[in-house]
Amino acid sequence: MEVFTKNKKLGAALMDERVCQQRFGTIMAKKLKIRVGELRAAESLATFWPPRSPPERCHELKGDRRGTFSIDLNHPYRLLFKPNEDDPPQDRSNEQEHWASINKIELIKIEDTHG
């Protein structure tokens, strides 16, 4: 899957392991490297489709954050990303099919979405 970020601080952290460790700490930096690697290695977001998701627990957020996805890092933090879709489907009744169509994502930020 194609993974990119427009967030300069996050992009710098992903490019330089030392910067990542300074910004997020050693444990978070390791988790971030693992998750980004898993996302890049996947053919599409369908690889993370629930119930196949654990331990990543990838899911789409709800409410005003619909369209943003979240994946576990180091509790309680999650990596947030949005699909970069040229032609997003109007009919989203088949979510599994929608996830399978997502092969480009933009990493947005790291956040505690529950706090």
Image (tube, rainbow, N blue to C red):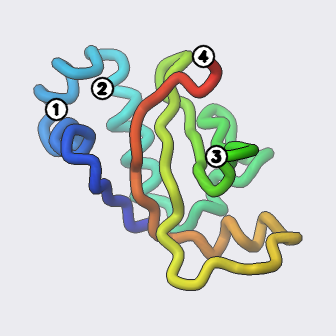
Q: Which mark is residue 26?
A: none
Question: What SS does tag 4 mark?
Answer: loop
Residue closest to the eye, 61 or 48: 61
Q: Are marks 4 and 1 in contact (CB under 8 Å)?
A: no
Three-letter residue code for mark 1: Glu
* Relative horizontal placement of residue 68, taking residue 89 as reference (left or right): left
Q: Which mark is residue 17?
A: 1
Estimate the x, y position of residue 68 in percent, counting from the top left: 59, 51
Q: Which mark is residue 29?
A: 2
The label nearer to you, 1 versus 3, is: 3
Alpha carbons under labels 2 and 1: distance apart = 7 Å
Compared to 68, does 29 lie above or below?
above
Estimate the x, y position of residue 71 in percent, counting from the top left: 56, 39
Three-letter residue code for mark 2: Ala
Question: What SS does tag 2 mark?
Answer: helix
Q: Residue at x 53, y 75 (%)?
A: 85
What residue is disc 4 on?
Answer: 115
Estimate the x, y position of residue 111 in percent, counting from the top left: 47, 28
What residue is disc 3 on?
Answer: 65
Question: What SS does tag 3 mark?
Answer: helix
Residue closest to the eye, 20 or 108: 108
Q: Are marks 2 and 1 in contact (CB under 8 Å)?
A: yes
Mark before the other along the chain sequence, 4 or 2: 2
